[in-house]
Every structure is written in structure tokens, then in C-alpha cells.
Image (cartoon, coloured by chain):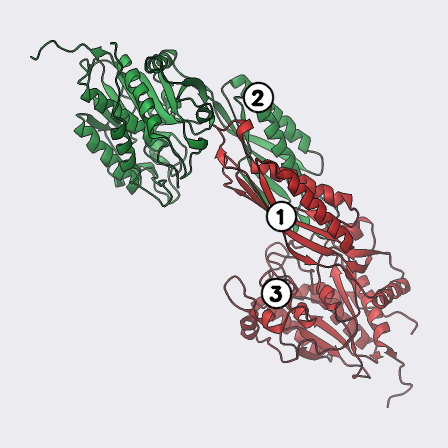
Chain colours: A red, B green
Amino acid sequence: MSAVIIVNGERLWHTLTVMSRFGAIAHGGVTRLALGEEDRQARDCLSRWALDAGCQVRIDRMGNMFLRREGTRPELPAVVTGSHLDSQPKGGRFDGVYGVMAGLEAIRALNDAQIQTERAIEVINWTNEEGARFAPAMIASGVFAGIFDLAYGHSRTDHDGVSILQALRQIGYEGERPMGSLAIHAAFELHIEQGPILEAENRLIGIVTAAQGQRWFEATIVGFSAHAGTTPMDKRRDALLGFARMVNAVNDIGRAFMPDGRATVGMAQITPNSRNVVPGQVFFSVEFRHPDEAILEQMEQRLRQAIDGVNNGALTAEVNRIFAYPPVTFDENCIAGVRNAVAALGYSHREMVSGAGHDACYLSAVAPTAMIFIPCVDGVSHNEAENIDPQWATAVANVLVNALLAKAGRVAAATSAG
Amino acid sequence: MSAVIIVNGERLWHTLTVMSRFGAIAHGGVTRLALGEEDRQARDCLSRWALDAGCQVRIDRMGNMFLRREGTRPELPAVVTGSHLDSQPKGGRFDGVYGVMAGLEAIRALNDAQIQTERAIEVINWTNEEGARFAPAMIASGVFAGIFDLAYGHSRTDHDGVSILQALRQIGYEGERPMGSLAIHAAFELHIEQGPILEAENRLIGIVTAAQGQRWFEATIVGFSAHAGTTPMDKRRDALLGFARMVNAVNDIGRAFMPDGRATVGMAQITPNSRNVVPGQVFFSVEFRHPDEAILEQMEQRLRQAIDGVNNGALTAEVNRIFAYPPVTFDENCIAGVRNAVAALGYSHREMVSGAGHDACYLSAVAPTAMIFIPCVDGVSHNEAENIDPQWATAVANVLVNALLAKAGRVAAATSAG
């Protein structure tokens, strides 16, 4: 194995363009919620392309799609890649779908080069990664990895009370493949960075070595609602003042653990939220992310100290942790595979930590896994304005096909037809 | 004129209790929105009581009700008192209605004492003081005083598109009395304080010498919405941090002008308000109150400086004044009338400034006016928990009847009949 394989960038971009029509909306983005009609169209299209490329298509009980390019030794654990076709409401046209299309393009490129591999290669489309229609996010990779059981996965319902099982049946994607039955030798997920780092540093490839752990909290500060005209300043119990203090405290916690730490107050509900009433209560979210569990613990301790500081008699404050994802360290051999492919191609790169959750995080519990990030313009994601450069798309797919090939084992070309 | 007149406190409390049944809700409060069915019931009841007390009842074009106890010199400008029967949604059972019932009780007490006055006394129920159903608040006293014209007043609509004129016709309260046709010699409005000062100082009577001016603002801080997991702390443009700074700045402005100054951020809308998105925008309200227009101007200047301080490149911020009520200074002769009555009765009292807007503020533009405050428990108002003590209700009505009598001129009792 010497020369690198190169994908067909134009063909890759064409598949992305076709996919962007399923659920297309006004300003260039897509609304393609999991297991809806637009998702069905995208799945059907992917399935046709896979069959045309000579793949077997199998569906598991959670609707995850597996496009298998057979190897010469089918009994060996497969090498896999993939991501998801579903989107956020008014989401972008690259989040998730890029990782699936890059996998498909890798198979096509191997076909073009008439390369056989020892191990099969499977491209996976994970169901309901976004969690926008059915909570929680990444439910189907979670069931695959044994984080959730199948009954739980099937029973999640959308806003209208439709369960995942019902939705799978409605669009004809309740498959028969048992969950987790695929043995995996190595797994790669390509994804847009959804952040600004690669573009800001003008680097093409993000070699993702880990995913941040997350701790999510809900907090409430209670004061007393009072008439804004008649209540003197020194007799107020203004919950919004406590909230302002917490916003600054959370920001300080994030800054204390730069560059990897993240600390965000994203949501707040003020009660009664009336122009001439001193706010009596503020309910808000706090989330921390860091690749080191010990530092997440420190962040949580500082949060609790800050909340205690708001409990000053006039105000009462409390915070509850609502969930925690531990940090994920990706597989050293898979990361090395990415490094080797990047080196062979000579692309600019950096190693980095994923700040977002991805199907690869769950998959890493049961299979050697790594991720590869592609820059996205201005770091914008979950937004119609989400964008990538076609040259980036080609380059990162080149990394993928070579990493897959190395893991799957190239079969030396026969000297003659046989 | 020597001895003071005393009202029948039990009768006054009974009228308040009966009134609290119109629109009664679960926890002791009322929902009696302006010109709704519950308001009609309350108006009809008031009208019956007034007729029973020998009054003429007249209604003007905005539905304001005038209950006239005739004087011996009907051609002289009348002495008036009153407030409003409408309530906030889930409001209290004393806000407004106490001022009307105290006026009715004053008439009954004069009847009981067989006292005639030179000037007529009119008790007024102003339409839609709260502004809860139709904005703006105090619309009907505003039309009476010429602040708004009648067409404007009639055309205000509620949430369902029903105009004030339509609502007046639906409940049969579009009257014929021309707006502002009543000549007024002196006016008094009794109202619950809606604040904590009188009760905290254990004083019975608030002699209101002025009403605070108000300036209301809307402000917007714009940053950039970004993924909370992937966006490093030092690359964020978090609008919520700018908001936290403004919350503190507004509070500091209020505290710089204690004890009379009020500064409140009561409402904020965070965009997108999602747990895992750095907030890209915050829209919020600011309001200032102070009895001195020059200080209101200083408060506004400090607000604009604080907003400028948030404009740091990463964030842009702007503030717009949406309206201003100038401060009101009540009539010195009317205030003196209140002081004299309080002194004659020997009640504890203090002079104070109204932090809230009242019909009396508009009325003061066209008539010599003053206000009298009664304490309310814990300063709570616009809340079902609003409460007053029956003894307070009686005492403040005693002040009213004696102040009215002094202004209306007691006619010496005839030495014999005929």
C-alpha cells in the first residue's frame, strides 16, 4: 500500500447538493426531522445510491441504515464510517449528511480504483442523531451501543405523541437487523466542526482525539415580585440581580478552564417578565463541558459556591444537575490511522477535542472509534447559514478513504483475471 | 364646622366584600377586566347603591360613571372623588375598588348625618384604569382630561380585536355625558399604596403630594448565537453577558437616586433561549421613576452611558425611550385639605410620592387634585394576596369624608323644618 486514493470531489459535492433538496427551505438550509417524509426521501435516495455502488443495504430495529461493501474476508469485523441524515429544524445542509456522503464517496472511490479490501466496509446512517424530533439525541447509536435498551428507544415520542417505532413503521424503516450485531474493527465519523477553530487557524483537518464530557444543570433563584413603581430599591428582592451575578460567575468558570472549558447559560425564564414588575423568580440552565472529568467536577463545585453566594437572605437559589455525559477518549489506533492518512496527503491539521456530542461518542463504548472534523464557515451550525468549502469536503473525504482502506486491508490486485 | 364626620366602617367593608364577588377567583382575588361581564355586574351594583343613596347616575362617552350627590348650589364646580372598579387578571380585591367604595361610603355617611353641602359631590368610577384589557392604562381619565381624544379612546382594542366602543355597547355603558364636561373644584383619589412604606413605618395615612415621572425604555443587545459545546470562551459574542452588565447598571442607577428613585429591568427575551446555544440577542425593558424631571434626565443619561459601555465590538447595544410621563405635583390646596382632615382625626401619617400611575395623575391636568394612600399588607398588589385591614379602610374613608365636606362647604342646618 503506497499511493493514496483520491475521491471524486465533484461527485461528492453533487450528492450533497441532491441531499440538500430533501427538506430544503428558503435560505439554503434544510428541515429534515428524523423519520419524517423528508428523511424517508433522503434515506431512499441513499439506499438507491448504495445499491448502485454494489452495496448490500440493511436496516436495524432502530432504523439505522448499514451500506455494506463486502470484503474478501466477510467473517472479520467490519470497518465502518457514517453519521446522520436528520437535521435540526431550519438546520444546515452539511451537519451529519456530510459524514454519510463522504462514506458513500469513499466506497465509490474504492470501486473506481477497483480496490478490494479484506474487511467489509459499512457506511452507517444513524437514526435521530439531532434529538430535535425525539429526545434524547443520538438515541439510535445509543441503543446500538447498549447505552439504552431497545424498548426505551422505540418508545420515545415526538411532540404529537408519535413514537419512534410508529414513525419507523410509517416510513417503512423498521428493519430486522438485531441491534449491535455488527462486529466492528474500527470506526470513523466525519463531521463539520460546528465551531470556529479550524477555519480561524486555516487548517483543513481536525483530528479529534476526545469528546468533552458534559454536565447540565437547572437553577432557580427566588426573590419576590413587586410593583416597580412603589417598591423602594432597598426593599426589593430582585431575582434578576441574582441571575446577573450567576451569568457572570458561569462565564468566569468557563474562562478559568480555557482553552478546553465551556460554560454557558443558554436559557432563562423570568417570572413574571412584566415591564413594571420587579422579577420574583428566574429559572435558568447552566452547562459545562471539558474533556477531563476531574475538571468538570471542579467546575460544578465552583457553580455550587456561586449559587451559595446568591443565597443572601433576600434571595434563595438552588441548582440541580440534570445529566452528565462523561468525557470520551477516542481509540489511539484509530486516531493513528487518521494521522497517517493526513500525513500521506500532506494536509494542514490540528488535533482537537469535540465540544459537541456525536454518534461516535456512543459508538466508542463498543468499538475502536475516532472522529475527523472538517472546518465550517464562521463556525456556524444548527443554522441555515451553515456552509463548507467544496475543496474542504474533498480533502476530508480523501483522509477518510485512506484511513478506511488502511484499516480494512487492501487486497493485492490479482495479476490476471480469474 | 367643628366636629368630624365618621363613616360606617362595617358598611364600607360590606360593600367591598360584595364587590369582591364580581369576578371572584380561587385565592381571594378577582379577575374583573374592564368592560367585561364581571365589570358590568360591579357597575350595575354600584349604580343601584348610588340610586338608593339618592344620587343621580350619569355615564360619559368613555363609560366613566359619575354618582352625583347634589349640592345646594348646583351651578358651582363639584367636589369629586373616585378610582376604578376594573382589576388586573388575578388581581387583588382592593386596588381601585377601595377608592370608589370609600367615595360611596362618604356619601352615605353625609346622608346619615343629614348634612347638606353647597357644592355637589360626585363619585367617579373611571373605565379601564388597569390597561390589562385595553392599552394604554388610564385611558378614560386620559380622555376626560384631554390627554387623548375620544376617537383614540374608543378605538383601542383588546386581545380579541374588540374595541372599547364595542365593549361599552356590549355591556350597555356607552353614556351620553360629553367628555370633560364636569367642572371640578377639588378632586381626591383614595388608593392602596401598592408598596410597603406605610405598613413598615406603622402609619395609617399616606398624604400623596406628587406622583413620580416615568421613563420607559426598550433595549437590545446583539452578539452572535453559537454552539455552546464547540465555541471557545474567548471566541464568544454572548449577548447575555452584556445583559447581565446592564441589569447591574440599571440597579446602580436606581440606588444612586434613593430613596425616591426606582430603576427596574422587568422583562427580557433571550434569543434563541436554548440550553446549548450561546445567546445571540437579548431584548429587554428598562423603566425609571422619580418625582424630579431633572433627575429622570440624569438617570436616562447614565443608562445611555451604560449601553455605550456594552458596545465593545463583540456586542452591539442600543436603547430607545418608548414613553415618558412627566412627574405630577398635586394641588397644594387639596393636599392641605387632606392634612387638615388627618389632623382633625389625629391619625398617624406621612407625606409621600406615588410610584404608580393613577387616574388622579391625568385628572390633575384639568382639576385641583390630591391622593390619599391606605397601607396594604406587605406592600403586595396586582396579586390575589393583596390585603388591607378593615380598620385602615375605615380610617382613610374618615379622612376622605371630612376632606370632601370641607371642600364642598357644609350648609348650616336649618333651625326648623319648612
Q: Quadrant of residue B259?
A: top right
Q: Position of residue A141 (x, y in %)?
A: 68, 69
Horizontal side of B119 relative to A97 (left or right) equals left
**Disc 2 crowd, CA 10 A, few/some/many (<14, 14-19, 20+):** some
**Residue A126 is at least partly visible in this image:** no
Q: Which residue is mark 3?
A: A22
Quadrant location of the N terminus of chain A? bottom right
Horizontal side of A44 relative to A192 (left or right) equals left
Q: Which residue is mark 2?
A: B257
| Residue at (86% x, 90% y) in the render | A418
How far apart are the two marked residues, 1 and 2, measured between alpha carbons?
34 Å
Give the label on residue A327, or none: none
How far apart are the two marked residues, 1 and 3, measured between alpha carbons?
42 Å
Dot 1 or dot 3: first in sequence order is 3
Residue at the outermost left position = B418
Q: Chain of mark 1?
A: A
**Disc 1 crowd, CA 10 A, few/some/many (<14, 14-19, 20+):** some
Q: Nearer the viewer, residue A23 or A261?
A: A261
> Which amino acid, by three-letter code, is at mark 3?
Phe
Horizontal side of B222 relative to A403 (left or right) equals left
Q: Position of residue B94 (x, y in %)?
A: 35, 33
Q: Chain of mark 2?
A: B
Q: Which residue is mark 1?
A: A319
Q: Chain of mark 3?
A: A
